[in-house]
Image: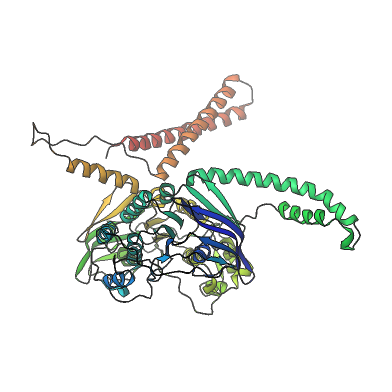
Amino acid sequence: MNLLSAEKLSKQYGDKPLFRDLSFGLQLGQKVALLGHNGCGKSTLLRILAGVEKADSGQFSMRRDLRLAYLEQEPLNRQTGSIRQWLEETYPKTGSGVGAQGSNVRTQGSGVGAHGSNDHDRGSDIIEFDDAHEEAQRIMDGLGITDPDLPLAGLSGGQRKRVALAGMLSSRPELMLLYEPTNHLDLEVVEWLEQYLRRQKCTVLLVTHDRYFMESVCQEIYEMSDGKLYRHPGTYTQYLHNKQARQAIEVVDAEKARSRMRSELEWMRRQPKARATKSKAREEAFYRLQEQAKGPQRRGDMQLDVQNQRLGGKILEMAYLRKQFGGRTLIFDFSYLFTRHDRIGVVGPNGAGKSTLLNLIAGNLRPDGGKVEKGDNTRIGYYTQHELEYEPNQTVIGLVRDRADYIKLSDGRELSASSYLNRFLFPPKQQHDLVSKLSGGEKRRLQLLLVLMEGPNLLLLDEPTNDLDLDTLQVIEEFLDEFEGCLMMVSHDRYFMDRLVDHLFVFDGEGQISDFPGNYTEYRNHKKTTKTRLDAPPPIDSPKKTVEPPSQARRLSYREQKELEQTEQLMAELTAEMKRLDALLSEGCGGHEDFARWGQERAECAARMEEAEMRWLELDELRGATL
């Protein structure tokens, strides 16, 4: 059953075209992820479909009486009263509503949005069902909303997102438009939402950067690129393969078009200047061919490079750290000494104190007890989840030049602020735009630039993946993977955490923080194993006997796995080189200097092989270690 049909939707801001002639449809039960680089128009398209914004041209229609819900980027920012009051006022029968600045779930009329106009005779009908309150309570429990009397004005971004989701989901919409639904949510809530959406028969169109979430929920990918929309059936993993194949075909087609265009260009030049004498059809075909010959327009890769201060003997020490807020103990007697190349993830429910810990380390908060001492050479860079701060009339390049006119790179060279911005995919023309005109993802990218240009060697990252497109995330992951300093991050992005962290600080409640050796997936598997063991009833014939869980092999972290593969490759190369040198030495062909050189090289290879074998054994032992 078709729920939504869009035909030739186009939109641009000023002289910047976002997309043109987009046509697509959504069927009942279809779950689609909308991907594209920051600023390509993903959020704008959702706003147009939700009736919040108008398209420049084109039209779309929805099934009569369709119940549509829209979750925008920052819901409930201007709402007052308590959670309970908002839910009851927004949706009296069920105590629920939609997170589009508190507006009700919309019931679609039969109108068509021609040329982007909001002609959908939207009603505000109340959707009634017998088990409404029971369903709403289950959803609130799943989203971790335990106190509905909290005031909306004092809620964090993650809490507002959960309230908006609770209202939206309990209204049972048939079509959900979701913008970054996992942003600001803690990991357990993300997993609950993932399972909930998988079970529902509703239609979902969502913008997300969460690769695990997308892989689990969506069966189709819509990619916005060069102002066009490409449809890719299948999961995110299948999309990556399909995209590579599509781009390879586009390159070949562009080359063929360029070859054909040469002969057509000669024909165009031979024609009289009077347009009436030319074949109009062939002329129009030439211009289409000219457009195809340009090939796919690719953004350059973001280049992350900065000169880092070398770490000293002492990096940072936390000793018996304590912090309370509003009578709640968030951190109690926590101690930790940072070591070189530490890769730490911080996990726990919203409000547990994760950001508080980062702020204590950064010096933005004072502890109630204990101390935080950093080494003389430690330079902290803090990438917060708060919005970028700037003056109303400040330009992009002006904001960067307020910090520095030149930025040092890892090889000692200096780049101007403009050149450095260009590396972060802010071309010269955009550098003179107002910061306020940037998309949410572009502001986050600019914020990252401002942090890195200070040359930190201890990076604190609070939700670093929010609002960034996947291409940018991959570049950041590669940079952080090779980063020579220490990392400490709070993130709901499980893929990001799994790739980059080696151990976790886990907020267990009542101020207690434990240190788990492994990444997030290993931690979740450990928790499930422990829970299964605790929940299992004891054997009837031996009630006092405890059964130990089967040992599990420890999975290497991403860095360790990568090092293991590199070590194995090095060992194979050294083996081949030693065989070559042995052959030269045994053949007896060569002068005295040749034999001396070959012997020295053979000894060096043997020493390197011994080191590689020792490291391989260490990594293999870690891989075989049990939890």
Residue in the foreground of this view, choosing between 26 and 327? 26
Residue in the foreground of this view, choosing between 437 and 95? 95
Residue beneath the point at 30% across and 62% down: 350
Q: Quadrant of residue 579?
A: top right
Question: Is the image coloured rainbow, by chain, by secondary structure, or in one colour?
Answer: rainbow
Residue in the foreground of this view, choosing between 101 and 294? 101
Residue 64: give x, y in percent of width and height: 47, 61
Residue beneath the point at 46% across and 50% down: 30
* Quarter occupied by the C terminus: top left
Above or below: residue 123 compared with residue 141: below
Residue 306: give x, y in percent of width and height: 51, 60
Residue beneath the point at 41% across and 33% down: 613
Residue 357 located left or right of residue 401: left
Above or below: residue 485 compared with residue 428: above
Q: Is residue 52 visible?
A: yes
Number of marks present in the image shown: 0
Q: Is residue 208 visible?
A: no
Residue 582: give x, y in percent of width and height: 55, 24
Residue 318 located left or right of residue 608: left
Above or below: residue 486 compared with residue 73: above
Residue 600: give x, y in percent of width and height: 53, 32
Residue in the foreground of this view, choosing between 46 and 500? 46
Residue beneath the point at 33% across and 38% down: 622
Above or below: residue 231 compared with residue 363: above
